C-alpha cells in the first residue's frame, strides 16, 4: 500500500536527519537521487534536474533546489533572502506562473505542505534545510516566499502566513547559518582542504575566514575567503598576521616576531613571515586584490600604531 503524502514527508525528514549525522550535513546528488526509499521499499528521488520537484506519489512539491554558483557567473535563478521579512525569495521556474512545477509549488502553499530546500555548495554537493514552507506567491515578480522553520513546530495550515516576529527571527538565523556553512564548504573545496598559511589538511581543524568581515559588508564568496586552520584564523582576525595584496606573502607583526616564547609562537606564527600563501588552482577562486588590500590597510594601521 502506497503511503500517504504526510507519511512520505515525515519519512523524508527522518531520513535527512539520520543521513546528516553521517555525512557532516552534506548530501551528494547520487545520495539524494537514489538513497531514500519509501516504507514499502521503493526508491523515491528527492531531487531532479528541475529546481522544483514533485514526485507522482506526493500531493504537492516535495523539494526546491538552489544551484551552486559558478565562478564569475550569475546563478541561474536569482534566489535571495530578505532578512527583515525573514523570507527566502525563490524564483519561479521560467516566466510562466502556470507552468506545471510552479503550480505544484503553489499547491504546497495552499495545502500547507512542508518541503525540503536543497542548497548547492559545489557541483553535485548540497546542504539540506527542512522543513520550509511556502508562505507567499508573487506572479508579477515571478517569486515565491519561503520561510525556514527548523527549530519551530510545524505550522498549522492557517498559521503559515502569520506575521510572527519569532518566526521571522528563527528563519533569518537558520538562513545565516546555512549561508555561512555553504561559504565554508566552497572555500575549503577551493583550497583543497588545506590551510592557506601552513597547509594543514585536517578539515575538522579548518575554517573559512572572511578577508573583509561579513560585519563590514564582506560577501560570502570564495574570492573573499581564505581556508585557515583555527590558530591562523584567530591570528588573521586579530591582525597578528596580514597578507600583502600584491606579493601574496604573509607578514607577521613586528612585535610578535620580537617576542621570546616557546615553540608554538616560533613555528606557529613567527616562521610564517615572508612565506607565500597557498592559493586555489582556479584563478577566479583566488583572493581578490581589492579585499586583500582593504584588510592589509587595517593590518598596517595596527603595525604603525605599535
Image (spheres, rainbow, N blue to C red):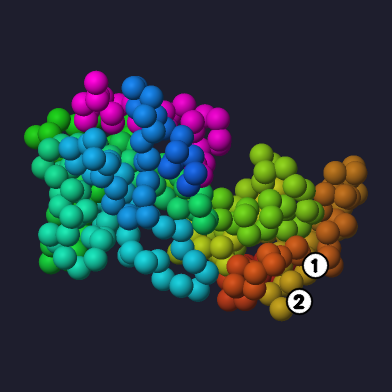
Looking at marks 2 and 1 on the same chain, the residue that comes earlier in the sequence is marked by 2
Q: Which residues are magenta?
A: 1-28
Q: Are marks 2 and 1 in contact (CB under 8 Å)?
A: yes
Does residue 184 show up magenta in the picture? no
User: Residue drawn 53% across and 59% down?
Assistant: 213
- Residue 159 is left or right of residue 236, and the answer is left
Q: Count every numbered label the image shows and give the total.
A: 2
Mark 1 crowdedness (10 Å alpha carbons): few <14, some 14-19, many ≥20: some
- Residue 10 is left or right of residue 102, and the answer is right
Dominant secondary structure (helix, strand or loop) of the stretch shown in magenta: helix
Mark 2 crowdedness (10 Å alpha carbons): few <14, some 14-19, many ≥20: few
> Residue 211 location, x and y as percent?
59, 63
- Where does the N terminus fall, quadrant-wise? top left
Residue 209 picture quarter = bottom right
- Looking at the image, is 232 positioned above or below residue 2? below
- Looking at the image, is 71 positioned above or below residue 111? below
- Looking at the image, is 77 positioned above or below residue 35? below
User: Residue drawn 41% across and 58% down?
Assistant: 67
Distance in Å between CA atoms under marks 2 and 1: 8 Å
**Residue 161 can be seen, yes or no:** no
> Residue 249 location, x and y as percent?
78, 69
Tag 2 residue: 247
> Residue 261 location, x and y as percent?
89, 45
Tag 1 residue: 276
Residue 190 picture quarter = bottom right
Amino acid at each position: 500500500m502506497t503511503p500517504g503524502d504526510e507519511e512520505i514527508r515525515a519519512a523524508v525528514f527522518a531520513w535527512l536527519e539520520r543521513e546528516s549525522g553521517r555525512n557532516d550535513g552534506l548530501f551528494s546528488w547520487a545520495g539524494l537521487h537514489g538513497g531514500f526509499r519509501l516504507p514499502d521499499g521503493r526508491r523515491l528521488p528527492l531531487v531532479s534536474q528541475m529546481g522544483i520537484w514533485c514526485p507522482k506519489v506526493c500531493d504537492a512539491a516535495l523539494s526546491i533546489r538552489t544551484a551552486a554558483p559558478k565562478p564569475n557567473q550569475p546563478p541561474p535563478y536569482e534566489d535571495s533572502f530578505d532578512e527583515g521579512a525573514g523570507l527566502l525569495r525563490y524564483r519561479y521556474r521560467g516566466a510562466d506562473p502556470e507552468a506545471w512545477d510552479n503550480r505544484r509549488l503553489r499547491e504546497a502553499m495552499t495545502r500547507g505542505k512542508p518541503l525540503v530546500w536543497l542548497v548547492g555548495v559545489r557541483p553535485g554537493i548540497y546542504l539540506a534545510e527542512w522543513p520550509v514552507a511556502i508562505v507567499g506567491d508573487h506572479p508579477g515578480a515571478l517569486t515565491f516566499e519561503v520561510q525556514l522553520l527548523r527549530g519551530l513546530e510545524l505550522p498549522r495550515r492557517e498559521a503559515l502566513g502569520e506575521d510572527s516576529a519569532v518566526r521571522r527571527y528563527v528563519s533569518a538565523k537558520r538562513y545565516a547559518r546555512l549561508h555561512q556553512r555553504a561559504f565554508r564548504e566552497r572555500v575549503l573545496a577551493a583550497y583543497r582542504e588545506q590551510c592557506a598559511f601552513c597547509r594543514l589538511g585536517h578539515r575538522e581543524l579548518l575554517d573559512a575566514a572572511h578577508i573583509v568581515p561579513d560585519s563590514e559588508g564582506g560577501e560570502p564568496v570564495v574570492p573573499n575567503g581564505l581556508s585557515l586552520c583555527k590558530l591562523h584564523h584567530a591570528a588573521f582576525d586579530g591582525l597578528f598576521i596580514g597578507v600583502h595584496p600584491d606579493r601574496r606573502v604573509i607578514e607577521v607583526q613586528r612585535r610578535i616576531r620580537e617576542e621570546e616564547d616557546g615553540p608554538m609562537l616560533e613555528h606557529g606564527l613567527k616562521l610564517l613571515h615572508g612565506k607565500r600563501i597557498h592559493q586555489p588552482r582556479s584563478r577566479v577562486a583566488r583572493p581578490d586584490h581589492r579585499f586583500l588590500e582593504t584588510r592589509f590597510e587595517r593590518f598596517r594601521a595596527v603595525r604603525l600604531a605599535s
